[in-house]
C-alpha cells in the first residue's frame, strides 16, 4: 500500500535505503476493516430498510459510523448492522425458476373473482 | 425462450429496469461505472479540502457550524459513492490507492485555490449548483446503487447551494470591499464551474456509450446550457456580473449564448498542472498516512474484544 509510516522493528533495521524493504513490506499489508450492511428504521412502526454499507472494525463502530453516515438528518430511530459476508442472497440468474411457483396462481389475487357490482364492502 | 445475457441486459436498459450488483453486465459497463463512480467519490473527498481551508476562519460561529456540516456531508457523499463502487467488485482499498497514487482523476474544480471567504459562497452557489444538475440526472442512471447514492446526495445537496448563495447575497449587500470580494470570487469560479460539465459533446470520449447504456442521460453541453440559463438569471439578484462579455439572451433559442471556454486551461488542470493539484493529493496522502495507526488500533481493539468474549 501507499506511503505507510515506515516502522522498523527492533533489531531489524535495514542496512541501506532506509524505508520499506521487500522484506518488511508484508508487515505493512493492511488488514482492512470489514464491510457491514446498514439497515435503518426511519420511525417507530416501520420496518428496518437497507440503506447502504460501510467499513468498520467491529459492530459498535459500525453502528457509530452508520449514525454519522446515514442519519445526519434524523433519518432513523434504530440501526441494524450486519457483516456483509453473513448475508446470503438469491441468485438473480435463477429468479425465473425461483419465482415460477407463484407465476400461474392468479386465483391468489382478489381480482380473479367475479362479484356482482351490487355487492359492496368486499 | 432462452436469451443471451447481453440481450437481456440491453432489454432491461431499454425498459428502464435498473441493473443491480449481481446482475450480468458487460465488462465495459462495469469498468465505465467503476471509473465514473470512483471519480465522483474522489471528488467529494478532495472537495472537502478547499472548504476545510476556511472552517477555522469563518466570519461567525453560525457560518462555521454550517461550513462544518457541509464538509461533513461531503465526506458522507464520498462514502455513499465508495460503497456503490464496491458493489461492482473492487475493494475500497484499491479505489483509495488509485486516488493516492494519482492514477484516478477527480473533478478539476477542486484544484483551484480558495482565496477569500467569498469563495465559500461561490463554491456553494456555482460549484455545487453545477454538481447538482449532474447528480439530479444521475438519480435516473441505469445502475441501481449509483442511482440510490445520488438520490441520497441530492436530498442533502440543496442546502449546500442555498447556503452558498446566501453567503454571496450577504456580501452583495455589504460594504464596497465586500461587494468587490463577492464579484472577484464569481469571476474566478465562473469559468472553472462551466468546465465541470466536461468536454464539448463533439469531443467527449465517454459520453456516447454511456448514453446508450443510460448511465448518462443528458449530454455535457445540455447540462452546461441549463446551468448557464439558471445562473445568468440568479446573478441578477446579487447585482453582480458573470465574467463573460459574450453572455447574451438569445430570444430565438430561448437560452443564453455564452463565450468559448478556455479548453487549454481545462486539459492542463486535468493533466495535473492546476494551481493546487499537488497540494490536494499531498493533503490526502498525509491524512491517509497519519491515520494508519488509528485504523490499526481499531482493528487490534476489535480483535481483543472478540477474544475476550470468547474467553468469557
Image (cartoon, coloured by chain):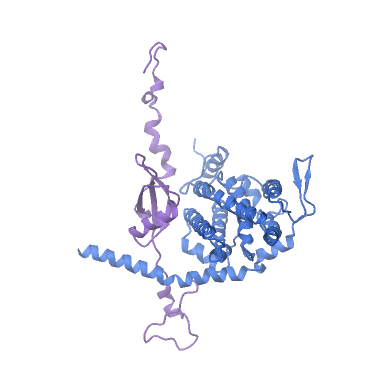
In the image, B311: left or right of B303? left
Q: Where is residue B192 in the image (x, y as percent from the top left)?
A: 68, 59
Label the blue chain with its letter.
Answer: B
Q: Position of residue B187 (x, y in %)?
A: 71, 59
- Tag count: 0
Q: Position of residue A11 (x, y in %)?
A: 37, 87
In the image, A8: left or right of B59? left
Q: In which quarter of the image is residue B241?
A: bottom right
B8 is higher (above) or lower (below) than A106: below
Q: Quadrant of residue A32?
A: bottom left
User: Do we see residue B291 in this rendering?
Assistant: yes
Q: Where is residue A122 in the image (x, y as percent from the top left)?
A: 36, 18
Farthest left residue in view: B312
Label the purple chain with its letter.
Answer: A
Farthest front residue in view: B175
* Of B203 and B281, the residue lying toward us: B281
In the image, B311: left or right of B118? left
Which quarter of the figure is the C terminus of chain B placed in?
bottom left
User: Do we see residue A87 in this rendering?
Assistant: no
* Of A71 and B137, the residue lying toward us: A71
What residue sits 39% from the left and 47% below the top?
A76
Amino acid at each position: 500500500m501507499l506511503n505507510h509510516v515506515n516502522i522498523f522493528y527492533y533489531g531489524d533495521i535495514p542496512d541501506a535505503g532506509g524505508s520499506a524493504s521487500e522484506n518488511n513490506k508484508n508487515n505493512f499489508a493492511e488488514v482492512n476493516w470489514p464491510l457491514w450492511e446498514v439497515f435503518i428504521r426511519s420511525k417507530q412502526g416501520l420496518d428496518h430498510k437497507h440503506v447502504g454499507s460501510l467499513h468498520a472494525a467491529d459492530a459498535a463502530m459500525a453502528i457509530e459510523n452508520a449514525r454519522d453516515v446515514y442519519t445526519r438528518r434524523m433519518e432513523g430511530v434504530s440501526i441494524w448492522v450486519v457483516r456483509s459476508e453473513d448475508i446470503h442472497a438469491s441468485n438473480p440468474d435463477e429468479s425465473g425458476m425461483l419465482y415460477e411457483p407463484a407465476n400461474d396462481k392468479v386465483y391468489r389475487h382478489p381480482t380473479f373473482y367475479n362479484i356482482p357490482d351490487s355487492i359492496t364492502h368486499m | 425462450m432462452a436469451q443471451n445475457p447481453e440481450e437481456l441486459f440491453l432489454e432491461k436498459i431499454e425498459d428502464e429496469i435498473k441493473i443491480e450488483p449481481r446482475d450480468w453486465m458487460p465488462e465495459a459497463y462495469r469498468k465505465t461505472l467503476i471509473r465514473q463512480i470512483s471519480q465522483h467519490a474522489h471528488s467529494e473527498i478532495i472537495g472537502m479540502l478547499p472548504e476545510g481551508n476556511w472552517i477555522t476562519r469563518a466570519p461567525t460561529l453560525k457560518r462555521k457550524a454550517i461550513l462544518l456540516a457541509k464538509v461533513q456531508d461531503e465526506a458522507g457523499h464520498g462514502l455513499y459513492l465508495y460503497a456503490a463502487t464496491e458493489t461492482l467488485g473492487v475493494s475500497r482499498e484499491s479505489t483509495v490507492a488509485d486516488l493516492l497514487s494519482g492514477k484516478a482523476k477527480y473533478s478539476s474544480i477542486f484544484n483551484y485555490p480558495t482565496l477569500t471567504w467569498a469563495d465559500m459562497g461561490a463554491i456553494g452557489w456555482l460549484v455545487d449548483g453545477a454538481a447538482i444538475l449532474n447528480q439530479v440526472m444521475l438519480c435516473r442512471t441505469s445502475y441501481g446503487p449509483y442511482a440510490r447514492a445520488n438520490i441520497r446526495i441530492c436530498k442533502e445537496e440543496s442546502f449546500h447551494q442555498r447556503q452558498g448563495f446566501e453567503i454571496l447575497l450577504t456580501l452583495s449587500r455589504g460594504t464596497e470591499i465586500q461587494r468587490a470580494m463577492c464579484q472577484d470570487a464569481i469571476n474566478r469560479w465562473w469559468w472553472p464551474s462551466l468546465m465541470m460539465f466536461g468536454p464539448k459533446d463533439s469531443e467527449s470520449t465517454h459520453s456516447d456509450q454511456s448514453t446508450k447504456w443510460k448511465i448518462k442521460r443528458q449530454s455535457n453541453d445540455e447540462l452546461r446550457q441549463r446551468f448557464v440559463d439558471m445562473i445568468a438569471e440568479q446573478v441578477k439578484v446579487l447585482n453582480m456580473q458573470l465574467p463573460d462579455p459574450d453572455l447574451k439572451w438569445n430570444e430565438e433559442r430561448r437560452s443564453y449564448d455564452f463565450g468559448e471556454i478556455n479548453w487549454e486551461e481545462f486539459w492542463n488542470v486535468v493533466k495535473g498542472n492546476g494551481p493546487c493539484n499537488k497540494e490536494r493529493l499531498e493533503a490526502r496522502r498525509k491524512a491517509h498516512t497519519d491515520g494508519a495507526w488509528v485504523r490499526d488500533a481499531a482493528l487490534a481493539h476489535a480483535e481483543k474484544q472478540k477474544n475476550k468474549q470468547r474467553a468469557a
